[in-house]
Image (tube, rainbow, N blue to C red):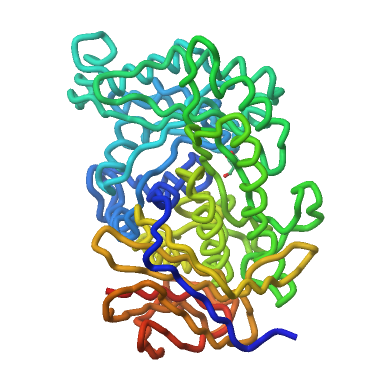
Amino acid sequence: MKSSRIALTVSADQPGPKISRHIFGQFAEHLGACVYDSIWVGADSPIPNVRGIRRDVVDALREIRMPNIRWPGGCFADSYHWRNGIGPRAARPRMRNDTWGQVETNAFGTHEFLDFCQQVDAEPVICGNLGSGTVQEMRDWVEYLNAPTGTILADERAANGHPAPYGVRYWGVGNESWGCGGLMRAEYYADEFRRYATFLGNYEKSRLFRIATGPGVDDFHWTEVMMRECAAPRFNPGVMDGLSLHYYMNGGIPPARVQQRLRATTFNHDEWRTVMAHGWYIDRLIGQHCEIMDRHDPAGRIKLIVDEWGSWYETEPTPAPSPYFQQQTIRDALLSALTFDAFIRHAERVHMANAAQVANVLHSVILTFGAETIRTPTWHAFHLYVPHHDAARLPVSGGEELTMHDDLPYPRVSATASLASDQSITVTLAHTDPTTAVELELNLAGLARNAQATGRMLGATNLTDCNAPDAPNRVASQPWSDFRFENNRLTATLPPASLAAVTFR
Ligand code: AHR
């Protein structure tokens, strides 16, 4: 029998590790309509744009302070040759994107991507081609991007319109090299990573942060081998800065167990719970990979980079406008919140994460319908977590009642608290029960001042509601003040399936 009341305590005077803003990053691949028609419309488009980059998309991403974006894949990265995407656009080759069975015009290449990053004010994360490329090709791309003028590659960059080095820091050395990136064994990839990473230069102020392909889901052998072979090789102990992890919530763990994927907008309460339970599984997964990393790297130098995560549903019963397009509901907003909370619980090791993918593909914050752009419920979850960016994690205790589903536990109310540099405290509360409200008591222990509380709340009239051009704000966060806050104690009723954020100043 579940209690109708949950009491939580935030220790306001015990700031812990920094919550890296980079865990709120995004991922854009040349897949479906993620890049073309969403980010890139071209300068001649009637859709308002700046140098071909869609203005409403940039505005929406600036509002959630998107800290970084990973590009050009994904699986596509291991068949992408960067030289096809530089120079005069009209002369760029039009070719097959074999990875996703579509035509690639190369109109959106290196300079366009970095212009997009600059417009959004996000850091670029580039994933280089290890699968079908060469060491030379990858090292040349880094020099082209980051070297000061005076060398043939940097001068070519200048001739293409960007004399100043771009200063790209985050660099992926291949993607899913155990799968679409070359079907390699961990032992083989470890050597390849060491070889490629060695030749990638550090130029001027931009020391490269080299990210190795990490495990898919629960491939602990991969993590073990990568940490054993790459955490501190004798002649270059700093060769690996990050190890990636990919985990998609598709309702089956391991993924091979999936008979039929869940659907995005038609689901019952049982399928709701499946998403919560399989979503929260990422907390256990990160913990298990971190145990291995801790053994090989007790100082925590090498970071875990969850550079692909999100929901992955069955294609909608009605034809989707483009491949891997899926709608988002309040269920996905709560899945996002649980995932952020898991990253934050492991803030000592998790430095960056990238939701897959930013627009029109899988777990998107943005959907475009021709000239219309809408913000999904997932966008609103990212928005409510902005105060946690680079803030110090605060301990939260109590309320540890876990719900079980598919033999997997997940929290009924997942809470994250943080202290920002302006001394404000924000608590986010993800209430995962789809049917029953809960009475919440939130105590701020150790807060030595009388604070004012302001809140926002995200909920939905129906669990399956989603935003669309005719109702762009059907599921959108609203100011929330339906609580009492006295003597550093907040009491409120959290509606079923809701996400709240309260800031105390
Ligand atoms: O995000 C879609 C695909 O999922 C990516 O290209 C790949 O890395 C992963 O398997």
Foreground residue among 238 and 326: 238
Residue 423 appears in the figure: yes
Q: Which of the image's four quarters has the N terminus? A: bottom right
**Count of picture labels:** 0
Residue 47 appears in the figure: no
* Left/right of residue 100 with respect to residue 45 in the rendered view: right
Foreground residue among 435 and 387: 387
Q: Residue at x 44, y 14 (%)?
A: 137
> In the rendered view, would you say 354 is above or below 446?
above
Q: Residue at x 47, y 29 (%)?
A: 241
Residue 212 in the image: x percent, y percent?
Answer: 54, 28
Residue 455 in the image: x percent, y percent?
Answer: 36, 79
Residue 441 in the image: x percent, y percent?
Answer: 50, 84
Foreground residue among 334 and 358: 334
* Left/right of residue 215 with respect to residue 486 in the rendered view: right
> In the rendered view, would you say 197 is above or below 94?
above
* Left/right of residue 119 with respect to residue 255 in the rendered view: left
Q: Residue at x 53, y 39 (%)?
A: 304
